Image (cartoon, rainbow, N blue to C red):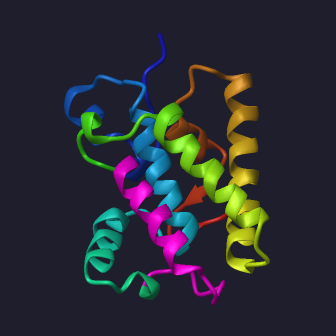
Amino acid sequence: MTGAAGTFCYIDPEYQKTGMVSVKSDIYALGIIFLQLITGRPPMGLAHNVNNVLEEGRLHEMLDPKEPEWPMEETKRFAELALKCAELRRRDRPDLASVVLPELNRLRAFAASTEDSAWNYLCQRSEKLCFQCVQELIRAPAMELSEFLDNDNIAKGSSFVI
């Protein structure tokens, strides 16, 4: 039996309290990664900060400045999905197959239908990450996503590098 391991900011808060891993444990880490994709910021306190600026209508202030032209409506929907994934309680997180993947497919279709550089940038970054995650999970299926991120140095300290 393999115990869960990984970087603190990506580990399911309920796992930290109970020691029990569930399917939705990795959904939490995915939410944090999604937030990092659009902000380019470190994970500590990121969900809280994004939630605050989203409620105040200031999401644009937290977006990755390397890409100056974010389509705000689509970015807001992506941020809302990320925050749902990063909910503290597992039962409040969305289902991967019925909620997360359909929304990602919708966003991919949006990116394909536009010349918008921000979404093409985001899709390139996220597709590379997903490809790396799938490759690693095929090699070591018992590994937690957060452990993969820690071991593969995708998420390190103060920057998120893909």
Q: Is residue 70 above or below residue 103?
A: below
73 horizontally vs 25: left or right: right
Tell me residue 121's x, y (percent): 73, 71
Which residue is rendered at x = 29% and y = 32% of the image? 15
For the image shown, how many numbered marks are present on the structure?
Answer: 0
- Residue at the (53%, 32%) spot, across then down: 97
Percent coordinates x, y for residue 25 in the rendering: 39, 34
Quadrant housing the C terminus: bottom right
Q: Tell which of 10 and 65 is nearer to you.
A: 65
Q: Quadrant of residue 161?
A: bottom right
Residue 69 magenta-drawn? yes
The front one of 115 and 3 is 115
Whole-percent x, y for residue 34 in the image: 52, 58
User: Can residue 42 be seen at all in this image of the molecule?
Assistant: yes
Which picture quadrant has residue 137? Answer: top right
**Residue 113 belongs to magenta span:** no
The relative height of residue 93 versus residue 153 in the rendered view (above or below) is above
